[in-house]
Image (cartoon, helix red, strand yellow):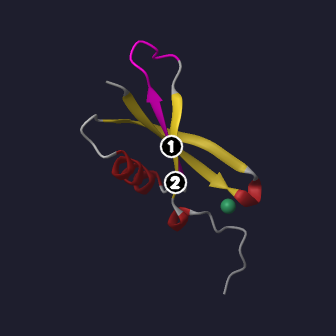
Amino acid sequence: MNAFTAVTYDVCPHESLCEAMNRYEIEKEEDIEAAAARAAGQDVAPLVEVYQTPAGKEDVPLLYKTYRFEAYTCRCGEPRD
Ligand SMILES: [Zn+2]
């Protein structure tokens, strides 16, 4: 059974920032997309990468899927009303 980990990223396109924030283990019975969405909501992260760690190869996690959450996109460079 492969283990999955979600990593949240703080992204600011105006400052060319893309910084990893937190790492969350995804329980094997959990829906991966739902777990990514929950992690994003917790950290207000516009980008979440889910990594798959093959059994016996814990040191080589593979990028499984990238999720983007437009609602959490940084708006700091946009003009105000
Ligand atoms: Zn910004």
The quadrant of the picture occupied by the N terminus is: top left
Q: Residue 19 placed where, x, y %? A: 63, 43
Disc 1 versus disc 2: nearer the observer:
1
Say whether residue 58 is left or right of residue 1.
Answer: right
| Magenta stretch holds residue 62 | no
Q: Which residue is mark 2?
A: 45
Are there few (<14), some (14-19), or many (20+) residues within 10 Å of tag 2? many
Question: What residue do we see at 37% from left, 28% from top?
Answer: 3
Q: Residue 15 placed where, x, y %? A: 75, 55
Quadrant position of residue 81: bottom right
Q: Residue 39 placed where, x, y %? A: 41, 49
Are there few (<14), some (14-19), or many (20+) residues within 10 Å of tag 1? some
**Residue most toward the bottom?**
81
- Figure check: 54 above or below 70: above
Which is nearer the N-term, disc 1 or disc 2?
A: 2
Q: Quadrant of ligand 1?
A: bottom right
User: Is 3 in front, or is 16?
Assistant: 3
Q: Which mark is residue 46?
A: none
The amino acid at mark 1 is Lys
Q: Is the C-beta separation of discs 1 and 2 under 8 Å?
A: no
Bounds of the magenta segment: 47-59
Say whether residue 6 is left or right of residue 80.
Answer: left
| Element type where label 1 sits in the image | strand
Q: Which residue is mark 1?
A: 65
Question: What residue do we see at 43% from left, 21% from top?
Answer: 54
